[in-house]
Image (cartoon, rainbow, N blue to C red):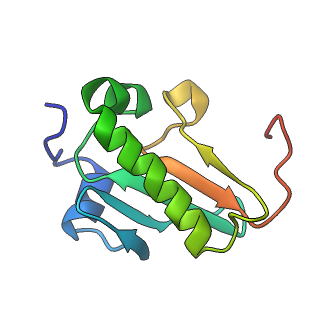
Amino acid sequence: MAGEPQADCLFCKIVTGEVPATVVRETETTVAFRDINPQAPTHVLVIPKAHHADAAALAAADPQLTADVLREAGEVAAQEKVADHGYRIVFNTGSGAGQTVFHAHAHVLGGRGLQWPPG
Protein backbone atom coordinates (compact mmCIF):
# COMPACT_ATOMS: atom_id res chain seq x y z
CA MET A 1 0.00 0.00 0.00
CA ALA A 2 1.28 3.48 -0.88
CA GLY A 3 2.81 5.31 2.04
CA GLU A 4 3.28 2.19 4.18
CA PRO A 5 6.86 0.97 4.75
CA GLN A 6 7.83 -1.92 2.49
CA ALA A 7 9.88 -4.73 4.07
CA ASP A 8 11.92 -5.28 0.89
CA CYS A 9 12.62 -1.58 0.17
CA LEU A 10 16.18 -0.35 0.72
CA PHE A 11 15.07 3.26 1.24
CA CYS A 12 12.35 2.29 3.74
CA LYS A 13 15.13 0.52 5.66
CA ILE A 14 17.22 3.72 5.58
CA VAL A 15 14.23 5.66 6.96
CA THR A 16 13.90 3.22 9.88
CA GLY A 17 17.66 3.10 10.50
CA GLU A 18 17.86 -0.59 9.63
CA VAL A 19 20.34 0.25 6.85
CA PRO A 20 22.98 2.92 7.51
CA ALA A 21 23.33 6.00 5.34
CA THR A 22 25.23 9.28 5.55
CA VAL A 23 22.28 11.52 6.37
CA VAL A 24 22.82 15.23 5.64
CA ARG A 25 19.31 16.50 6.47
CA GLU A 26 16.15 15.11 7.99
CA THR A 27 12.70 16.58 8.48
CA GLU A 28 9.45 15.15 9.78
CA THR A 29 8.59 13.94 6.25
CA THR A 30 11.92 13.52 4.40
CA VAL A 31 15.46 12.16 4.69
CA ALA A 32 18.42 13.35 2.59
CA PHE A 33 21.57 11.23 2.35
CA ARG A 34 24.68 10.90 0.21
CA ASP A 35 24.50 8.61 -2.82
CA ILE A 36 26.82 5.62 -2.42
CA ASN A 37 27.83 5.88 -6.11
CA PRO A 38 28.08 9.65 -6.68
CA GLN A 39 27.82 10.97 -10.23
CA ALA A 40 28.95 14.49 -9.25
CA PRO A 41 30.94 16.05 -6.39
CA THR A 42 27.59 16.73 -4.69
CA HIS A 43 25.15 13.85 -5.10
CA VAL A 44 22.50 13.62 -2.40
CA LEU A 45 19.24 11.70 -2.50
CA VAL A 46 16.12 13.25 -0.97
CA ILE A 47 13.38 10.75 -0.18
CA PRO A 48 9.96 10.94 1.41
CA LYS A 49 9.76 8.88 4.59
CA ALA A 50 6.48 7.43 3.29
CA HIS A 51 6.87 4.79 0.59
CA HIS A 52 5.72 5.69 -2.92
CA ALA A 53 7.10 3.72 -5.86
CA ASP A 54 8.18 6.67 -8.00
CA ALA A 55 7.81 10.42 -8.51
CA ALA A 56 4.54 10.10 -10.46
CA ALA A 57 2.95 7.92 -7.76
CA LEU A 58 4.16 10.32 -5.06
CA ALA A 59 2.75 13.37 -6.85
CA ALA A 60 -0.60 11.68 -7.46
CA ALA A 61 -0.96 10.43 -3.88
CA ASP A 62 0.47 13.32 -1.86
CA PRO A 63 1.16 16.71 -3.52
CA GLN A 64 2.25 18.25 -0.19
CA LEU A 65 4.83 15.53 0.38
CA THR A 66 6.05 16.05 -3.19
CA ALA A 67 6.53 19.73 -2.36
CA ASP A 68 8.40 18.75 0.83
CA VAL A 69 10.85 16.65 -1.22
CA LEU A 70 11.46 19.50 -3.68
CA ARG A 71 11.86 22.08 -0.90
CA GLU A 72 14.39 19.85 0.84
CA ALA A 73 16.27 19.38 -2.45
CA GLY A 74 16.72 23.16 -2.51
CA GLU A 75 17.80 23.18 1.14
CA VAL A 76 20.35 20.44 0.41
CA ALA A 77 21.73 22.45 -2.51
CA ALA A 78 22.13 25.50 -0.26
CA GLN A 79 23.71 23.46 2.56
CA GLU A 80 26.10 21.77 0.12
CA LYS A 81 27.02 25.20 -1.35
CA VAL A 82 25.99 24.38 -4.93
CA ALA A 83 22.85 26.56 -5.06
CA ASP A 84 24.66 29.69 -6.26
CA HIS A 85 26.44 27.89 -9.12
CA GLY A 86 23.51 25.75 -10.22
CA TYR A 87 22.42 22.22 -9.54
CA ARG A 88 20.15 19.60 -10.98
CA ILE A 89 17.22 17.79 -9.37
CA VAL A 90 16.54 14.47 -11.13
CA PHE A 91 13.72 11.98 -10.61
CA ASN A 92 14.27 8.74 -12.54
CA THR A 93 10.86 7.14 -13.02
CA GLY A 94 10.82 3.53 -14.17
CA SER A 95 13.59 1.05 -14.89
CA GLY A 96 13.95 2.31 -18.49
CA ALA A 97 14.93 5.71 -17.06
CA GLY A 98 17.47 4.23 -14.67
CA GLN A 99 15.37 3.91 -11.51
CA THR A 100 16.86 1.05 -9.49
CA VAL A 101 15.20 1.57 -6.09
CA PHE A 102 11.44 1.79 -6.38
CA HIS A 103 10.90 4.33 -3.60
CA ALA A 104 10.47 7.87 -4.93
CA HIS A 105 13.68 9.87 -4.65
CA ALA A 106 15.20 13.06 -5.99
CA HIS A 107 18.88 13.20 -6.92
CA VAL A 108 20.48 16.56 -6.10
CA LEU A 109 23.56 16.91 -8.30
CA GLY A 110 26.07 19.77 -8.37
CA GLY A 111 29.65 20.81 -7.99
CA ARG A 112 30.64 20.34 -11.62
CA GLY A 113 29.41 21.43 -15.04
CA LEU A 114 26.15 19.66 -15.85
CA GLN A 115 25.58 19.54 -19.58
CA TRP A 116 22.22 19.01 -21.27
CA PRO A 117 21.25 16.52 -22.40
CA PRO A 118 22.84 14.40 -19.67
CA GLY A 119 24.91 11.36 -20.44
Q: Is residue 4 visible?
A: yes
| Vertical position of residue 21 compared to residue 56: above or below | below
Q: Could you tell me residue 53's position as x and y percent?
A: 33, 33
Q: Could you tell me residue 80's position as x and y percent?
A: 61, 74
- The image quadrant of residue 102 is top left
What residue is shown at x 37% (from left), y 39% (from top)?
A: 66
| Vertical position of residue 49 compared to residue 16: above or below | above
| Vertical position of residue 34 compared to residue 100: above or below | below
Q: Could you tell me residue 68's position as x and y percent?
A: 37, 49
Quarter occupied by the C terminus: top right
| Vertical position of residue 48 compared to residue 96: above or below | below
- The image quadrant of residue 84 is bottom right
Q: Is residue 104 visible?
A: no
- The image quadrant of residue 33 is bottom left
What residue is shown at x 86% (from left), y 45% (from top)?
A: 115
**Count of residue discs:** 0
What residue is shown at x 46% (from left), y 52% (from top)?
A: 71
Q: Could you tell me residue 35's position as x and y percent?
A: 53, 63
Front residue (pair 101, 106):
106
Front residue (pair 66, 45):
66
Quarter occupied by the N terminus: top left
